Image (spheres, rainbow, N blue to C red):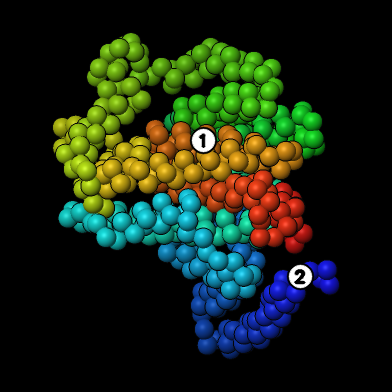
């Protein structure tokens, strides 16, 4: 500590002193709660809440990176029972800890600005819609605030060197393994139930909302594992292990069994781009092999060609291409054009019934009456017109800019960029042909990864121009390796 500059040394001493005082206070508080419970003055549920909540806030304040890791490592099927509003509270405390106790200033410029502007628009421009659409719009508004806090906390935790890339990858893997364990338990160890599209499979595999969500969720660990394997074959690449190979193959198999074409596309694009960008084109041989397996196996071939059995031309003409997505997008583009240039306001996209769009009940799931656009770019266009589309595109462009800044660094500083190539591809595919914003497990990971990539991009630009406010090597060391306490 003696080698630190005086302002940094003072800030660290203040942080450690405040943590000790609050920890001692919470110990006394916890003993008081236990005494109340022991005397029968409070119920079990009340005692549990009174014990967990303060410690969760204390953890958020002094270990914000732990909060992010915990949220990502928890199987999303279990976290779905906790509302975004409730989860926003510890994230606000974590952001306060990063700013007040660590001397950071919340940065609302760059990629945070488009997202913050979208949040502002949800409050300023609301459509006059029915109660169901109004409720859906309100839920999106609270979720968007939660996602913005996830991005901000992740961004600043990397910037101060507390959130490591290794810890985040382990959290993603733990979450996926936990979801897989729940799925296997649901299937009753029935091998046929592992084929997600089969009748034997549960309706909510791994407690996820829809079967296709499982495919996106298992392809992410494959993308990371594949990038690690290819990186290990390069000069100055990270050392790999037998377990990385095992998890990559296991999640590739699960991606195939998910019967989610978006996940299949993400896996293929990841193999192509990672092999190309790292100049290991021999891995491209996996692409025709994967395609051959999909075509040869009757079940996968049927799924791949399910909406073009009558020919590609007729499928495009009738709108059946993409499981009728093309027809949906044609109808919604017409609705968006009628509200140009400013859109219909928050909730407008949820005001369409299947009967109004198609003349029949379609594109809904179970008792949910909402028709989702299956394209986030189109969704924001419907809500806020050209401005909504520009803001969402701006967020992606700034993420791509940050990603390019990272991979232009010298090894090993550019490894985080390569490790997340496939993850970003998966998010882009889900945003283009599905409902990334409305698939909460994916959206949570998207905004955390967005914050991490943006932070690495900022550090890369500071390092390249030699104008960083603190030692860049310290930042990279803290970000490329897991924090010691993690």
Q: Earlier in the sequence, mark 1 or mark 2?
A: 2
Q: Quadrant of residue 55?
A: bottom right
For the question of whether residue 132 can be seen, the reply is no
Residue 428 drawn above or below residue 447: above
- Numbered-mark total: 2
Which residue sits at x=34%, y=26%? 323
Q: Residues within 10 Å of mark 1 (few under 14, many from 20)?
A: many
Judging from the image, what secondary structure is the residue with disc 1 in? helix
Q: Is residue 392 above or below residue 219?
A: below
**Residue 354 x/y as whole percent:** 21, 37
Q: Find residue 58 and report its horizontal and vertical position in percent.
A: 61, 73
**CB-based contact (under 8 Å), mark 1 and mark 2:** no
Residue 86 in view in this figure:
yes
Which residue is painted at 80% across and 35% down in the image?
A: 236
Q: Residue 121: x percent and y percent?
A: 31, 56
State the mark number for residue 426: 1
- Viewer-side residue, 192 vs 83: 83
- Answer left or right for 93 relative to 371: right
Q: Residue at x 65, y 24 (%)?
A: 275
Instruction: Using the image as rendered, state which of residue 296 and residue 261 is in the foreground.
Output: 261
| Residue 180 picture quarter | top right
Q: Is residue 461 above or below residue 266?
A: below
Decide: few, some or many residues near mark 2? Use Cα within 10 Å; few <14, some 14-19, many ≥20: few
Which x, y percent locates residue 7? 71, 74
Residue 5's label in the rendered image is 2
Which element type, helix, strand or loop, lies under badge 2?
Answer: loop
Dividing the image into 4 quarters, which one contains the N terminus? bottom right
Left or right: residue 238 compared with residue 388: right
């Amino acid at each position: 500590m003696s080698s630190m500059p005086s302002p940094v040394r003072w800030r660290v001493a203040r942080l450690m002193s405040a943590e000790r005082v609050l920890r001692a206070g919470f110990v006394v508080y916890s003993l008081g709660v236990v005494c109340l419970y022991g005397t029968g003055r409070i119920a079990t549920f009340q005692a549990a809440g009174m014990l967990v909540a303060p410690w969760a806030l204390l953890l958020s304040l002094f270990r914000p990176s732990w909060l992010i890791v915990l949220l990502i490592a928890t199987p999303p099927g279990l976290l779905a029972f906790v509302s975004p509003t409730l989860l926003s509270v510890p994230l606000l405390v974590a952001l306060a800890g990063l700013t007040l106790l660590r001397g950071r200033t919340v940065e609302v410029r760059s990629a945070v600005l488009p997202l913050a502007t979208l949040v502002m628009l949800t409050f300023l421009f609301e459509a006059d819609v029915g109660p169901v659409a109004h409720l859906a719009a309100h839920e999106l508004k609270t979720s968007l605030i939660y996602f913005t806090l996830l991005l901000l906390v992740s961004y600043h935790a990397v910037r101060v060197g507390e959130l490591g890339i290794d810890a985040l990858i382990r959290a993603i893997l733990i979450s996926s393994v936990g979801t897989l364990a729940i799925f296997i338990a649901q299937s009753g160890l029935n091998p046929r139930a592992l084929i997600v599209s089969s009748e034997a499979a549960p309706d909510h595999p791994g407690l996820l909302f829809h079967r296709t969500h499982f495919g996106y969720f298992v392809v992410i660990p494959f993308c990371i594992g594949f990038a690690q394997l290819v990186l290990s074959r390069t000069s100055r690449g990270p050392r790999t292990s037998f377990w990385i190979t095992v998890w990559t193959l296991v999640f590739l198999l699960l991606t195939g069994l998910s019967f989610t074409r978006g996940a299949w596309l993400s896996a293929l694009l990841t193999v192509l781009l990672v092999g190309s960008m790292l100049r290991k084109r021999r891995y491209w041989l996996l692409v025709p092999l994967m395609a051959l397996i999909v075509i040869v196996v009757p079940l996968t071939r049927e799924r791949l060609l399910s909406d073009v059995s009558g020919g590609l031309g007729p499928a495009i003409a009738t709108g059946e291409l993409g499981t009728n997505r093309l027809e949906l997008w044609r109808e919604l583009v017409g609705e968006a054009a009628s509200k140009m240039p400013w859109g219909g306001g928050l909730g407008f996209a949820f005001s369409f019934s299947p009967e109004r769009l198609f003349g029949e009940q379609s594109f809904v799931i179970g008792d949910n009456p909402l028709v989702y656009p299956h394209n986030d770019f189109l969704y924001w266009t419907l809500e806020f017109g050209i401005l909504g589309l520009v803001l969402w595109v701006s967020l992606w462009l700034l993420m791509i800019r940050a990603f390019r800044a990272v991979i232009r660094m010298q090894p090993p500083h550019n490894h985080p960029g390569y490790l997340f190539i496939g993850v970003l591809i998966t998010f882009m595919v889900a945003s283009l042909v599905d409902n990334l914003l409305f698939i909460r497990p994916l959206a949570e990971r998207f905004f955390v990864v967005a914050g991490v990539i943006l932070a690495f991009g900022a550090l890369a630009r500071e390092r390249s121009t030699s104008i960083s406010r603190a030692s860049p090597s310290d930042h990279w060391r803290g970000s490329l390796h897991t924090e010691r306490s993690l």
